[in-house]
Image (spheres, coloured by chain):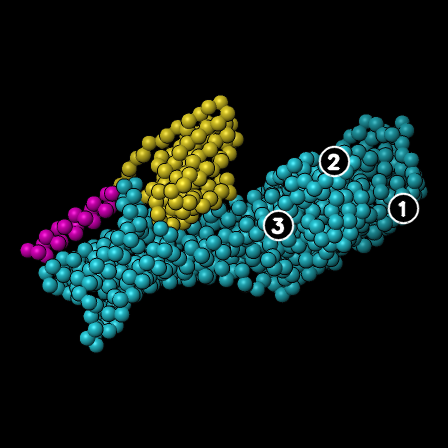
Chain colours: A cyan, B yellow
Amino acid sequence: MSYKNRFVFSLVVSLPLLVEMFLAPFGYHIPGGDWGEFLLATAVMLVSAGPFVRSAWAAFKHHHANMDTLVAIGTSTAYLYSIYAMLNHQAVFYESAALVVTLILLGQVFEERMKHSANGAVKKLLDLQAKDAEVLRDGKLVMLPLDQVVMGDVIRVKPGQKVAVDGVITEGKSTLDESMVTGESMPVEKSVGDAVIGSTMNNTGTFMFKVNKLGKDTLLSQIVEMVKKAQTSHAPIEKMVDKISNIFVPTVLITSIITFMAWYVFFGATVGQALIFMVAVLIIACPCALGIATPTALMVGTGRSAKLGILIKNGEALEAANKVKTVVFDKTGTITVGKPKVTDVIGDERMVLSVAASLEKSSEHPLASAILERAESNDLSFVEATDFQAIEGKGVQAMVDGKLAFVGNDKLLQDHKLGPQLKDRMTALQTEAKTVVIVGLDDQIIGLIAIQDAPKQSSMNAIAQLKQRGLRTVMLTGDNKLVAEAIAKQVGIDDVIADVLPGDKADHVKDLQENGPVAFVGDGINDAPALTTADVGIAMGSGTDIAIESGGIVLVKNNLEDVVQALALSEKTFSRIKMNLFWAFIYNALGIPIAAGVFATLGLTLSPELAGLGMALSSLSVVANSLLLNKVKLTSNAKERVVA
Amino acid sequence: MDKLVVLIGGITLIAFIGWWFFGKHQSAAVDAQVTEKQQRARVSVDGGYTPSTLILKKGIPAQITFNRKDPSNCLEQVVFEDFGINQFLPQGQDQIIDIDTSKAGEFNYACGMNMFHGKVVVK
């Protein structure tokens, strides 16, 4: 029988008992007197309380005790004693047993409902998935269910349709609403070559795309997987709670026995009076409130953040994010757009570019692609380079046309001289926040290439908001100090650590940790060690898989303002957890002594019925408090879309 | 006289509760049934998990069938933190849960409130 049915049954059956409780002073009694009460209470005990007893016994055999143990012992004691008292013509309290069962079941019914709504985030995400797709097969478009779509299929998406899986547009263009997956509230324009995300909504145009990710590899599936893991994870703060809940119920049992002994043996109460105190102690103690304090808040908090495109991976990351004092940013791709462009070429442009392009052709460095792009737009043909050699931390060298050519950063100046004129130009370019690449041929520096990577629009806002929260902001970059400082000034970052070798990022994070917990925000492969070293690693979603693996928080949208949101959400969630735990503890710490009759001399006691109501309310208040996380305001300019 | 009996009885009961709940009580670990392609095991959920420790072989896909007999909502969910599994167990029905056995190790699971515990050992 479900909790709801058990509740309804016990409510109906114990109603006459409740009526009698209030009307007894006016001379109303249930037909049959004590025996009438006995019949009603017996029905409640058998039907509604039976499962409590059964569970309690099953747990007892495993050396366990839980809420059911307390309810079962409490109500059975009241019920069995009443039978004894009835046979000996003493006062009975059948109504206590029946009403306590009813009230506790009421609490359980509500708790069940609220827990389901706390659990809804993952289900809502999964519901987003399209059911079928229009696939190109043998030159014809056919409607196929999603499970028949294979890698490499070409799918057509019409306006108003959902993109079925992840892929790349091969034909046509459109604007897409990606808010349901990434949290991005503005429609995004996409054309040939752009990636589309499964389960997003196509708005205006018709396009074809080639499938490149299916099933559990799609972004949505990965997000769902991450949210699931986050919701089942535990926050470090729970360790203490677990320790307490392991001994909680047996301790309450012992307390209740002591209560009975104290009242009966030392204070001369009757067996009936002493039993009432004992039962009240058993009923008021609620391990549920303690048990659900953290999981419900974690579930609601991580679920809500997922809707905003912020994936908090586990309770540990959430708790750590809440304590952060310093936020460290990687520069390229995090503060800046990550798509550098060549702005100036000093020296013989064709010559400089062609040498540089020859050397950078096989490199995957973002600066290299900027140089190649510029060379291609100038229609330069570049010479084949051989004998590539990396110059550690400085650049590369190779043979071009039988001569030794080199390309790299200003550390190359340790080995090569730069004329005073070029030196001035270089400093000037660097203070304009442009990265300068030195190009040399045959032991001579032949020119400079200035490359600029503009800060993201969101960077300035994000950093201002972080400062408002009282956090120190630091930029960590392998770039030259002048360039780094120029960018830092543009976006308002406090401190700059420049000229950092890729392998040293983690060490710098460690140094910063001496002044308090550090969050590191980054996206590149070389950021992975720093992401892991930091107390909280925040990986940008545009980043590489390895960065996303290493981060404790992943920002799907690649928008720096989400760093602020992520920290705000963590703080809000964590403060809910603390609030929940506080109430759960206070409730028990105050409730148990009152129920035991410690304050009886002051006239403050608790009947078992009120204790039952208290137990129901305590876990309800905890779940309600967690659910309120869905309504909490985050930052002033939070753009949140309500996922229906 | 009555009071003395109550006092002695109460103290005995307290001692029993302490021993029964806080004392060390061992339960045996059980191996899963292994065929070449599959391994299966059953866990009965009734006031705890029986068997509470399951041993699985690494690399063979595993399925654990949970059957909840206990009517209490304390045990209505089973949570494998390491695998991101949070599964509702309908009362009186078999619920199959797939376990990733690609990595060896001890994986604890618990009820939704982390009060009842079980363990899967992959080796």
The chain ID associated with circle 2 is: A
Q: Position of residue A539 (x, y in %)?
A: 63, 47
The chain ID associated with circle 3 is: A
| Residue at numbered disc 1 | A346
The answer to whether marks 2 and 1 sit on the same chain is yes
CA gap, disc 2 to disc 1? 54 Å
Q: Residue furthest left?
A: B1
* Label 2: element kind: strand
Is residue A369 or residue A75 the one in the foreground? Answer: A75
| Dot 2 or dot 3, earlier in sequence | 3
Residue found at x 35% / y 49%: B72
Residue found at x 85% / y 49%: A343
The answer to whether marks 1 and 3 sit on the same chain is yes
The chain ID associated with circle 1 is: A
Residue A128: which numbered mark, if any? 3
Q: Which range is magenta?
A: B1-20
CA gap, disc 1 to disc 3? 53 Å
Q: Residue furthest bottom?
A: A26
Asked if the residues shown at circle 2 and circle 3 are in contact, with their CB atoms under 8 angstroms apart, the answer is no
Is residue A566 or residue B51 the one in the foreground? Answer: B51
**Would you place residue A540 above or below residue A390 in this image?**
below
Residue found at x 77% / y 49%: A206
- The amino acid beneath tag 2 is Arg
Q: Is residue A257 left or right of residue A118?
A: left
The answer to whether residue B115 is magenta is no
Report crowding for label 2: few under 14, some 14 to 19, many 20 or more residues within 10 A (C-alpha).
few
Is residue A420 or residue A259 the one in the foreground? Answer: A259
| Residue at numbered disc 2 | A137
- The amino acid beneath tag 1 is Ile
